[in-house]
Amino acid sequence: MLHSTRSIGVRGIRPMLALLAVGAVVFAGCSAAASPSPTASTSTPASAAPTTAASVASVAPSAAASASQAACALPPSDKPIVIGVSQALTGDKSDPGTAIQHGYQTWVKEINDAGGLLGRKVVLKEYDNQSLADTAVSQMERLATVDKVDLMFGPFSSALTIPTSAIAEKYKYAFIEGAGGAPGVFQRNFHYTFFVQPATAEHQADPFVNYILALPADQRPKTAAYPQQDDPFVKATLDGAQAALEAGGIKTVYKDIYPPTQTDFAAIAAAVKASGADIVLGGTIFSDAVAQSQAYSAINYQPKAVYYTSGPSTTGPFEQALGTKVNGIFTGDGWIQASKATGNDKLVPEYHALFPKETDIPGEAAEGYSVGQVLQAAVTATNCLDNTAIADWLHANTVQTVQGPIGWDAVGRPNGSYLLEQYQNGKLHVVAPANDPNKDADPVYPKPAW
Amino acid sequence: MGARRIVPFVALALFLILPIFVREGFYLDLLLFTFMYAAMSVGWDIMGGYAGYVSLGTAGFFGIGSYAAGLLVVHYGIPVFVSAPFIGLFAALIGAGLGWVSLRSRGTSFVIVTLTFTYVVQLLALNLRGITGGSSGLYLPLLALPAEFVILPFYYSMFALLVVAILVSLAIRRSKFGLGLIAIREEEGKADGSGVNTSLYKILAFAISVSFAGVAGALHAQYLNYMDPDLAFELIITLSVIIMSLVGGRGTVWGPVLGAFIIQPLSVYLIYLAPSGIAGQVHLVALGVVLVLVVMFLPDGIIPTFETWRAGRSKPGRASLADEQVPGVAS
Amino acid sequence: MNWELLLQAIVLGILTGGVYALMASGLTLIFGIMRVVNVAHAAMIVTAAYVSWLLYKNYNLDPIASIVIVMPVFFVAGALTQRLILRRLDGRDVTLTVLVTFGFAIILEGLQGSIWSSSFQAINTSYSLNSFEVGGIYVPLIRLISAGAALLILGALFVLLVRSNLGRAIRATTQDPRTAALVGVNVEHVTMLAFAIGVSLAAAGGPLLGMLFAFYPATHWLWIGKLLAIVVLGGMGSLTGTFVAAMILGLAEQIAVVFLPLDWAPLVFYGVLFGILVVRPRGLFGATARESL
C-alpha cells in the first residue's frame, strides 16, 4: 500500500547529501581560486610562502639578493606583501578589536607612504571573526592554507589569541599580537608567539608595588583590599600585585570578585571600609572604577592610596564623572598619547588623519601600531619574509616601539615595564619608573581626601 | 532502487578518503564542524522532532562536555578520545536528571528548564574558579602530532560521531520506542491513556539526544585547546542546531544532516562573500529571521515538504502515525 | 550578625521586588492568554531600555518620563506582531510559537549589537547617585522612584483587569477560551490586545532597568531566567502570584548578597525555579482550568 515515508526519506536524501558535499568542496575550490576578498590580492604561493630555512636551497643566488644575511635571500619582487589577520570586528569584543585593527591600519598606511616593507607594498587581509573562537580558527586555517599569506598579526583578547596562536605555531607563522597577555597564552611554550606590550598582566602593577614597598616603614601601609571584576586580565594583574605585596608584609584584609554587570557598589564600599584596609587595589575596567570611587567618597572612606587596573587612563570620561575626586588615583598603562617613545610622533598624526572623528586615541590602537613596528624591525633586520628567521631574530633582540623598548623571553613574554600614572591637580602624570623619558612628576602619598 | 541503496555507502567512503586528496586545513576544519553540527542536530531532533519537545539547552550540554573533557585532561591526563564516550554517558545522565525535573508534566516546564539550564551551568563554570579556572578559562595541552596530521583525529572522530548519531536515530525510528515518541508528539493524552509510559520515554529520549552534544563538546575542547565560560556555552550552538533541524526537516533522520550541510558552509562563507564587517553585524539577526521565516512558512523543513510535493499528497510528509509501518514488516 | 546590613538588604529587596513584579507581569499575562512562554520578553525590556537611553542621551528626557512614550509604541508593535505573525501559528503546535519568540529574542539582540555595539550602557541621570538616609539605612533615590512607578503601573493594570470589560474578557479567555467564546468574547481580538498589553508592560520595565542596572545586548538571557523563576514561583498566568513571587525573590536576592559572595546571587533564582518545578510545578497561585504546567 503506502510506502513508508521513512524508507523514501532514507533513499531519497543520500544522493542529495553526497552531491551537496561534493558541491561544497568544488565550490570552495573555485571560490578560493577566484579570491573574492576585496581587500587584497593573494601573494603567489611559491616565493613568499612561509617555510623553514630548507627553502633557501630552491632560491637562485642572484646578484640582487642581499648578501648580508645569507640565511634567506629573496629574489626581488614587486608583488605586495600580504599580512593576514582574523579580528574581532563585530560581537562582544568589537570595540577594542576595532581599535587594534585601526592601529594595524595606521601602521600599514605609514609604512606604505614611506616606501613599503623591503621596497614592497604592504596589504592587510582582514577577516571578521565576530569574537567567536571557532570562526577565528577557521579563518586562520584559511589564511594559512588557502590564502597562504606571507605574515600574520594577532586578534584582540587572550581568549581569541590562545586558540589562534596554536594554528600559527602549527604552520610556523610568527604570531605577533598586542592583546593576548593572560598567563595561558604562554603556557604551551610556543616559539612563534610574541606579546607586544611592555609586560604581561602579572607585572602591570609592578611599578606601584615597588613604590609602596619602597616607602619608609613608618609610612608604609599595613593592609590592602582587592575588590575586583571577574575578568582574566584583571585577575592576573591583581594576583600578581597581591602576591608581591603580601611577600612584602602587607596583609590582605578584603578580596571579593564581582560580576561585570555589578552596578551597585554601596555594599562593597561598606565592606572595604569595614575591613580597615590602608590601601585599595581595584580590579576595574572603567565604569566600576568610577562607581567604586563614588561609593568610597559617599561613605567617607579615605584610603592612603588607590590603584585601579584600568579606567583612569580614559581621561576624558573619567575626569568628567569624578571631577576633583580624581586626584591621587593611580593606574598602570603601557602607552600615553603624549608619549615620547619611538614612532609616537608618527602614530598620533597618522591616526588622526585616518580616523578624524576620534579625539582620543584608544590604547589598543597603540598596541596595534606597536605590533606593526615589531614586524617591521624583524623583517628589515633579517631582510626576509621567513617567519622562522623572524621569530628567531625577535627572541634575540629588543625593538623600540611606541610603548617603549620591548624584548621577549623564549615563550614570547615581554620583558619591559609598564608605566605608573597618577592624577595630580586634575591631570594624569607619569610618575614611574624613574628612568622613563615620559616621567614628569613624583608620586604623591598619601592620597588627598576625596 | 538497488542503485540508491549503495549511495549512503558511497558517501561514507567519499568522506573517509577525502583527506587524502584535500589537504588544506581550511576545508577539513569546515567539514569537521559540519559533521559536529549535523550530529548535534540529529540528536536534537530525537527530542524536538520525534517527541516534539523543543530543547533550548543544547549549548549547556556542549559546555558540560567541554569542561568535563578539559578537566579530565588537565587533572588526570585522560585524553579526550578516550573519555569522549563516557562524557556522552555523563551528559545523558544529566539530561535524564533534567528530564526528571521537567518532563513528568507536559510542555512549558521543559522549555523553561532547558533555556535556563545553560546559564546555570555557565554560572557554575564561572564561579567555581578553583576547579574550572573561572573567567580565565582552561588550557589543554596540544596533541603531540606533526602539524599536517593534527586535524585528522578530529575530522574522523566528528565523522564517527555523526555516523553513530544517524544509526541511533535510524534505530529509534524503526523501534517501538520511536513509535511511542511520535505518539507523544501527535497526541500525548491518548498515548498516556493507551499505556505508553510517556514520562519514561521522554526522559530517555532527552538523555539520548543530549549525549551527542556532550561528546561534541568534549572533542571540540581538545580541537580548540582552550575553553572559557563564554566560549563553551555560546548561544549560537543552540540556535544553529535548531535552525538546521528545522530547515532540513524536523522528525526525519536525514533532515538535520541536510540542514547542517546547508547552514554551516553558508555561515562560514558569508564572511568571505560579504564586505568586511557587514556579515558579522547581521549574522545574528539573519539567523533569527531565518528561524522565524522557517517556522512560519516551512515548518516541516525541506525533506518532508519535498516528499509531500513528490508524492502529491496533501498531508505533511514527515513521520506520522498514519503511515508508520510496524517494525519488521518489509516496505 | 550585622542587623543594619540585613535591614538595608530588606529595604532594597522590597524596592527591587516591585520593579521585578512589573517586568514579570507581562510575561505571566502573555502566558495566561496564549499558553506560550515569551522567550523574547526580557529582550523586549532591554530594547525599551535602549530606546529610553537614546531619548535621554539625545533629548535629555528623564527615563521615568520616557515610560509614557515607550509603552504606547511597544503596545502597537506588540499588537502588530501578534496579528501578523503569531496569529498565523494559532492551532498549530505551540512549540512553533515558542520557537518564533526565541527567534524574536535573537533578532532583537542582534539588532542591538549591530547598532550600539556590545558595550555596557546605563542611564545615569543627575540624581542617579542620590540617596537619603533613614535611621542608618541608605535608600537610593532611583530605587524608590522606580518602585513607585512600577506600583503605579501595576495598580492601573489591576484596575484594568478587574473593572473593565476588556479586563474581564482577558480573564475569561485566560481561564477557558472556549467558554469565553460561548459567552460572546471575541477571543482572537482579546488575545491580540492582551499580548500587546504584555509587551507594553515589558516596555515600561525598560527605562527602569536602564536606570538601576547596566545593560548590553546579551543581558536579556540573564533577565529571562530571573523572570521565569518569578512567574513559575507565582504560578504561570496569575498576576497576584507574580507580584508575591517577585517580592519574595527580590528579598531573597538582596539577603543572599549579604551572606554569599556577589557572583552567586543569580543562583537564588535558578535554585527556586528548579525547586518549584520539582516540588509544586503549578507554583503558589497557579491553578487554571486548562492543562497545567
Image: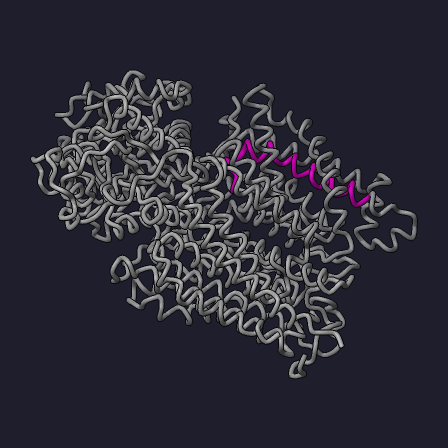
The stretch drawn in magenta includes residue C197: yes
Task: Give the total of numbered labels.
Answer: 0
Quarter holding residue C61: top right
User: Going by the image, does B210 lie left or right of B294?
Assistant: left
Colour scheme in use = one colour
Q: Residue at x 7, y 35 (%)?
A: A68
User: Going by the image, does C91 lie left or right of C118?
Assistant: right
Inspect this view and state whether residue A240 appears.
Answer: no
The stretch drawn in magenta includes residue A244: no
Quarter holding residue B27: bottom left
Magenta-colored segment: predominant secondary structure: helix
Q: Residue at x 73, y 34 (%)?
A: C76
Image spot of residue A336 (x, y percent): 27, 24
Q: Residue furthest right?
A: C183
Image spot of residue C285 (x, y percent): 71, 55
Q: In this view, does C54 lie above or below C235?
A: above
Q: In which quarter of the image is the C terminus of chain B?
A: bottom right
Q: Is residue A263 above or below residue B196?
A: above
Q: Which residue lies furthest to the top in this view?
A: A425
Image spot of residue C159 (x, y percent): 79, 38
Q: Which of C52 and B205 is in front in this view?
A: B205
Inspect this view and state whether residue B22 appears.
Answer: yes
Q: Nearer the viewer, residue A202 or A253?
A: A202
User: Going by the image, does A291 lie left or right of A59?
Assistant: right
Magenta part of the chain: C190-218
User: Going by the image, does A383 lie left or right of C110?
Assistant: left
Q: In which quarter of the image is the N terminus of chain B?
A: bottom right
Image spot of residue C273 (x, y percent): 58, 56
Q: Residue furthest bottom?
A: B328
